[in-house]
């Protein structure tokens, strides 16, 4: 009933308002929302809004309902707004997860062949739950990243290593920055891999074969964290310019909808 | 439930032991709290004593045997909110608060509930940072609970039944109570939350017997009151300065010491030019009258949300060559301060965590600001971040080692400038924050010399902590980590002695007490209260 009321309200609002005022929406967002959702909407104390699909707000009626009524039992409060303000801030929120429209030149079909063949990407990345686990999951990477970012990640993987420190979290349960870690145990065994998790007393890493190893720090002779390093190779020399275009086209086509 | 029935119940699981009749009629007089050190088997007030020490004189569990410590019971709550309680312990019974504004009495021996008070919370309650509660206060056989809908409730400690229910403020415009009250003589002192909703902050005292308000001290002075000129225009009306962490009390000076939070709006100081007294301050207040004796402002005209809501630690120490009645505070702005608690005179201040916003403090303790550290449209990176070099969770002072212990946070954030727009009941923040790409925050337990702030040792933590500390006469510091470890360190050198992975982030303060003559250590972790013993 509440959602219906909001929907009705929106219809009325859209009838009287041809275009939402995007800049006014941004200003409202800064006033009411950034303290929890971050200045760029990519999360903080509140959820990440800079994603193409908002699980709790799949349509505008749901989004409007959340803004006006909050989410009971969470820190998302009610917020009083006029119809016009609501339409404005919703337009801004919807823009946050939009991937920039950039031209894609290659062939997604050829790109998939390179991904699985010459590029050898699958041992480290998974799509729809199939593939390796050393690097980020790519099922809907085309919705989350634009072609420019994808190309840069292929050419210079260390240019922007993803992490979950940028969008502020009060307590980080899993440190998702794929930090490369090298350890040597008390008996001289060496391991290299991506950090899966860590606490004050222990660390868990995943090696290139996908095996998870767990160590208590007091049992280690050495523990090195290779900040800024990525186990992913640069494809600048490994692939031709046309092949890079194809892989970018393939990745851009991955929208989680298979 | 009558005592006979209770005794029958408690007898069932302890076939080998005589049944214990739990006395459900605690009588906690002010005398008992004043002399809390005489009965270390109990935990009678939020910080264990009025001085804010969170130090237990119990030493059954000590550096030589703590390795054998293990969980003896767990009590799980049924709410998924953050569980920040400090239990009170009186003669074999724990009194805890649970989120959002509930209370439960637990048998200290078994962790079994003896009664539960469950308060329905209106759906339109506004609390910036979670519907939490940090604990109760007790006087006689009455417990006091602040609620997120801004009531102060008196409960019969024997049954959990409501004795009185006082409206402290209007929750619909952002007032809430999350702090444990403090009982001083015949009054219940309670602080308010709501600094992110444009409230005008205050500290209240209520008659413990009747619930009638005895006094209110406005932490944002009105027209004609001292300090009012530090607010431009009408900005004082939405000035914040909440009082959401329990203070300390000196019975000899008869003074309360209580911290205040950020001014509103948080990140944009434009509309509130001036120092914004008494935000980000420590106040010394006469508990009989509510009159301000002195104040000290740590962060004038704060634009980084560095509330000064901390437990002040009262110590008598030689500072700069002279014996002082002192109050020590490790502040969210990353400086450790020692003040004269008789006069408020600044004695020393030195960073205990990384800071990049001030050149230092002048000889009166006022920060000498660095340029370009205010929030900006493009973001300004500053240490400490918005959650500070430490936060609300308690420090500890060990009379055994003479050291001050603080859980420190090493975390920068980028501060953004937003547009302030006040509407009653709406968030009033005017900005935001982000973490720093590629810069992983961390934390540490640090031991400081009380009179100099000099670091004696540190124990690193993987991430910036949200758990307070407890020291004991067993020579240890107990602390908690976000990753779930509850741990014991050697208080003299910081070496880890024991740990237990609780499985949930620890965002509370530990306590210690006796149960059936045996020492237990208790802490809330995740959504459970743990009791550890041998």
Image: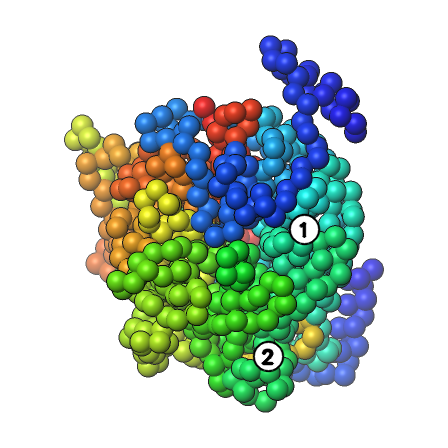
Q: Please determine whether, in this image, residue A59 is positioned above or below residue B363.
A: above
> What residue is shown at x 39% (from left), y 49% (from top)?
B397
- In the displayed structure, does residue A4 sit left or right of residue A103? right
Q: Quadrant of the N terminus of chain A?
A: bottom right
Report the Cα–Cα distance between label 1 and label 2: 27 Å
> What residue is shown at x 46% (from left), y 79% (from top)?
B301
Tell me where residue B238 appears, x and y as whole percent: 62, 78
Q: Which residue is mark 1?
A: B145
On the image, which quarter does residue B187 sit in? bottom right
Bin the neighbour count of mark 2 within 10 Å (Cα to Cα): few under 14, some 14-19, many 20 and up.
many
Question: Please, which chain is the residue tagged with disc 1 on?
Answer: B
Residue B207 vs residue B418, the one in the foreground: B207
Q: Which residue is mark 2?
A: B221
Residue at the farthest bottom position:
B233
Considering the numbered disc 2 on the image, is that residue within a helix, a strand or a loop?
loop
Tell me where residue B304 appears, x and y as whole percent: 45, 71
- In the displayed structure, does residue B524 sit left or right of residue A12? left
> What residue is shown at x 63% (from left), y 54% (from top)?
B185
Q: Please say if the residues under marks 1 and 2 sit with CB atoms less than 8 Å apart.
A: no
On the image, which quarter does residue B148 sit in? bottom right
Tell me where residue B268 appears, x and y as whole percent: 50, 79
Residue A146 vs residue B132, the one in the foreground: B132
Tell me where residue B516 appears, x and y as whole percent: 56, 24
């Amino acid at each position: 009933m509440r959602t219906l009321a909001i929907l009705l309200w929106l219809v009325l609002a859209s009838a009287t308002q041809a275009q939402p005022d995007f800049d006014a929406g941004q200003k409202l967002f800064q006033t009411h929302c950034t303290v929890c959702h971050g200045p760029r909407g990519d999360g903080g104390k509140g959820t990440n809004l800079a994603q193409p699909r908002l699980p709790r707000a799949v349509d505008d009626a749901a989004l409007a309902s959340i803004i006006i009524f909050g989410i009971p039992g969470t820190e998302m409060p009610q917020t009083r707004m006029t119809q016009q303000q609501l339409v404005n801030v919703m337009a801004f929120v919807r823009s946050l997860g939009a991937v920039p429209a950039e031209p894609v030149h290659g062939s997604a079909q050829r790109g998939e062949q390179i991904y699985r063949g010459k590029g050898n990407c699958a041992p480290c990345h998974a799509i729809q739950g199939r593939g390796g686990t050393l690097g980020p999951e790519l099922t809907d990477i085309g919705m989350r990243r634009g072609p420019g970012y994808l190309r840069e990640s292929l050419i210079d993987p260390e240019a922007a290593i993803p992490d979950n420190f940028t969008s502020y979290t009060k307590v980080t349960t899993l440190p998702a920055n794929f930090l490369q870690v090298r350890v040597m145990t008390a008996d001289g065994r060496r391991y290299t891999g991506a950090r899966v998790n860590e606490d004050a007393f222990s660390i868990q890493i995943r090696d290139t074969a996908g095996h998870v190893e767990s160590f208590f720090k007091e049992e280690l002779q050495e523990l090195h964290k290779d900040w800024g390093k990525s186990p992913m190779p640069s494809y600048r020399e490994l692939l031709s310019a046309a092949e890079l275009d194809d892989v970018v086209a393939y990745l851009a086509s991955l929208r989680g909808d298979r | 439930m009558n005592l006979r029935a209770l005794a029958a119940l408690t007898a069932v699981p302890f076939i080998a032991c005589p049944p214990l009749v739990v006395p459900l009629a605690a009588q906690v007089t002010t005398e008992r709290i004043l002399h809390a050190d005489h009965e270390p088997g109990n935990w009678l007030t939020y910080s264990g004593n009025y001085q804010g020490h969170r130090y237990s004189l119990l030493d059954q569990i000590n550096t030589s045997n703590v390795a054998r410590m293990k969980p003896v019971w767990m009590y799980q709550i049924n709410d998924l909110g953050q569980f920040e309680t400090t239990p009170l312990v009186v003669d074999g019974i724990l009194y805890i608060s649970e989120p959002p504004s509930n209370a439960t009495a637990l048998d200290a021996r078994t962790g079994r509930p003896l009664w539960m008070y469950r308060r329905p919370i209106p759906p339109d309650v506004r609390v910036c940072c979670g519907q939490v509660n940090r604990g109760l206060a007790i006087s006689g056989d009455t417990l006091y609970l602040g609620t997120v809908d801004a009531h102060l409730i008196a409960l019969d400690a024997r049954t959990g039944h409501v004795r009185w229910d006082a409206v402290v403020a209007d929750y619909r415009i952002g007032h809430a109570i999350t702090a444990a009250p403090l009982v001083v003589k015949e009054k219940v002192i309670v602080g308010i939350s709501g600094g992110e909703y444009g409230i005008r902050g205050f500290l209240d005292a209520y008659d413990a017997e009747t619930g009638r308000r005895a006094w209110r001290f406005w932490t944002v002075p009105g027209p004609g009151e001292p300090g009012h000129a530090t607010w431009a225009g009408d900005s004082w009306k939405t000035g914040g300065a909440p009082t959401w962490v329990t203070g300390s009390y000196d019975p000899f000076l008869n003074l309360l010491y209580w911290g205040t939070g950020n001014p509103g709006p948080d990140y944009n100081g434009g509309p509130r030019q001036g120092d914004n007294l008494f935000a980000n301050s420590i106040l010394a207040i006469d508990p009989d009258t509510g009159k301000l004796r002195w104040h000290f402002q740590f962060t004038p005209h704060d634009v980084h949300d560095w509330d000064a809501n901390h437990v002040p630690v009262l110590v008598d120490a030689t500072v700069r060559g002279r014996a002082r009645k002192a109050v020590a505070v490790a502040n969210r702005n990353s400086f450790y301060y020692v003040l004269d608690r008789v006069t408020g005179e600044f004695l020393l201040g030195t960073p205990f965590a990384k800071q990049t916003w001030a050149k230092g403090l002048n000889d009166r303790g006022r920060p000498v600001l660095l340029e370009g550290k205010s929030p900006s449209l493009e973001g300004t990176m500053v240490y400490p971040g918005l959650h500070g070099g430490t936060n609300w969770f308690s420090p500890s002072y060990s009379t055994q080692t003479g050291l001050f212990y603080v859980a420190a946070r090493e975390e920068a954030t980028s501060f953004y400038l937003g547009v302030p727009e006040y509407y009653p009941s709406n968030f009033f923040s005017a900005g935001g924050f982000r973490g720093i790409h590629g810069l992983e925050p961390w934390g540490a337990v640090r031991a400081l010399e009380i009179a100099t702030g000099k670091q004696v040792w540190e124990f690193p933590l993987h991430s910036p902590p949200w758990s307070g500390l407890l020291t004991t006469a067993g020579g240890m510091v107990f602390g908690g980590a976000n990753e779930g470890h509850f741990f014991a360190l050697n208080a003299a050198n910081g070496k880890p002695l024991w740990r237990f992975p609780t499985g949930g982030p620890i965002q509370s303060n530990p306590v210690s007490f006796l149960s059936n003559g045996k020492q237990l250590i208790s802490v809330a972790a995740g959504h459970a209260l743990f009791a550890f013993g041998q």
